[in-house]
Image: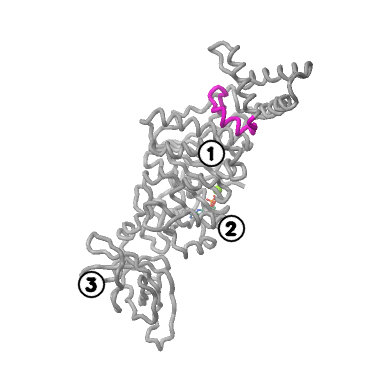
Amino acid sequence: MARRGDREEIGRVMYDSERLGATSCMISVDKGTIARGTYVKIDGEGGRFYVGQVIDGPYYFDSEVGNRDPVYVARLNAVVTGEVQRAVLDRPKPKAPVCLLEKDLVQRFLGATGNMSIGRLTGQESVQIGLDSDTLTRHVGIFGTTGSGKSNTIQVMMEEASKAGFSVLVFDVEGEYVAMDQPSDKLQGLLERFGLKPTGISDLMVYVPQNSRSRRNDAVKFGISFEDVDLRVFSEVAGLNSMEHIYFLDLIEKVRAVAPAFREVTLKAVLERLSARLRAQADNPTLPGIVAEAHTTLYSKLTVIEGLKIVDTSVKPINVMNVLTPKKISVVDFSDASDPVKNIVIADLLDKVFKQKMENPDTPKLFIALEEAHTFISIERREHMMATLVLLLELARRGRKRGICLNIISQQPARLPPELLELCNTRIMHRMSSATNIEVLKQSTGNVPESFWDTLPSLGRGEAIVASPRYTMAVITQIRPAASRRLTTE
Ligand SMILES: Nc1ncnc2c1ncn2[C@@H]1O[C@H](COP(=O)(O)OP(=O)(O)O)[C@@H](O)[C@H]1O
Ligand SMILES: [Mg+2]
């Protein structure tokens, strides 16, 4: 198919052969074929034009009808006079010329403008699909089955956010982003089609939990300081029930009371205190059974946490002020960490960056990427993770005004607590075939044409339906490949 200029006439409006509906018309295209989803400009009277989108076709009717050319159905989306865009109250006349809508007009019509370009409109490659910083702080969800392109998309978003001056923090579950300071070694031809060259990020910092390994030798080890943790969130992540939590707080108070003011309260000291209590109990069982039981289970749960060797280690916690540096990408590599370590660290870091952002309004905007969010907080665990959920909701709601942008990535949106899903105003939905997951998104995402949902199971790699509050309607987008390197995982 020859490449066609934006303004070239590609066909004409047809006479009606049936009643299509007030906001559709049939067009016959005499130059090649066009993809569904393509935007067209249909001439109207008095210098007006219609913005239409091809939603059906091509059909090839018998030549006796008098037309051998492919026929399409276009939905009329708006009427434009000069700069003014209005509702469609009539239909174009038969034989009215049809052109492809110029890329700037498509972008303007869609509202898909913004300083961060994430890809191109599928079917009309000259049209860039963008997002802006203000949209990002209304939070983002990236969904799709394994291998559909989620990680590439979040990497592209990280590159764009860094370029736009955000500080970036990514919880890297598989250790994929630890080499983003190097140029990409994959999909280079495709990258070139987006007008880009493989380029590494200039300011990358990789952290790895103490006692875990990273494929990056210069990864900075870190621990967690018990003195600084949010105790409610800590209790939850440690799996304490409400009774254990009460005794836990009581023990901390007792330890604090006897510790000199300059000494920090450590998890070890709390455990020792608890151990002494249990010994006394063994010698002289005065506590009611249920209380003694709670002490015993508390002891074993806290021992598990201590055994993770992440709390009160000799290595320092991450200095979140370093994370809050413009353009810097900070990667926390969890590829070798256990789930409890991952969960404790994520909860603690979210708490710390949130507090730091609230106390220091002058810090740069912060872009946070949470991969496999459903393993951190899910519907099944919702009841037991209220404090963590509240932390996330607060961070999203109050943090928004301070430029915090939360990106939730998950292959199972149906397993995310609904309030978390609701937070994601922009949604990038990759290929997905599970009806349950599609249904959850369908129920909670506005402005997606019905026919788009049917395409979700058949989207190609890197293709996605992008729905965003600034967009007139959702668009099917070919996301660009990342320009920086991503390590492959087995
Ligand atoms: N935007 C894209 N364009 C072209 N190929 C892509 C794109 N996104 C992903 N891919 C291809 O698909 C593979 C899987 O993508 P990935 O981002 O790892 O998926 P997920 O994180 O959803 O499992 C990648 O290794 C890459 O080869
Ligand atoms: Mg992935």
Given residues 470 and 308, the one toward you in this image is 470
Color style of the picture: one colour
Would you call the spot at circle 2 few (<14 residues within 10 Å), some (14-19), or many (20 or more)? some
Tell whether 421 sits left or right of 243.
Answer: left
Q: Is residue 143 above or below residue 234?
A: below
In magenta stretch: residue 60: no
* Residue lying at 51% horizontally and 28% vertically, measured from the top left: 318
Q: Residue 476's spot in the image, x, y percent?
A: 44, 59
Sooner in the amino-acid sequence: mark 1 or mark 3: 3
Q: Quadrant of the N terminus?
A: bottom left
Q: Is residue 90 above or below residue 455?
A: below
* Residue lying at 41% horizontally and 28% vertically, measured from the top left: 359
Range of the magenta residues?
A: 222-242
The residue identified by callout 3 is: 45
The residue identified by callout 1 is: 389
Would you call the spot at circle 3 few (<14 residues within 10 Å), some (14-19), or many (20 or more)? few
Would you call the spot at circle 1 few (<14 residues within 10 Å), some (14-19), or many (20 or more)? many
Name the quadrant containing residue 439. Answer: bottom right
Q: Is residue 202 visible?
A: no
Q: Residue 331's spot in the image, x, y percent?
A: 51, 37
Q: CA distance from mark 1 to mark 3?
A: 56 Å
Name the quadrant containing residue 120. Answer: bottom left
Asked if the residue under mark 3 is in contact with the one under mark 1, i.e. CB atoms within 8 Å, the reply is: no
Tell whether 52 sits left or right of 385.
Answer: left
Tell whether 186 sits left or right of 64.
Answer: right
Q: Residue 348's spot in the image, x, y percent?
A: 54, 31
* Residue lying at 73% horizontally and 27% vertically, measured from the top left: 290
Q: Amino acid at mark 1?
A: Leu
Q: Residue 36's spot in the image, x, y percent?
A: 42, 68
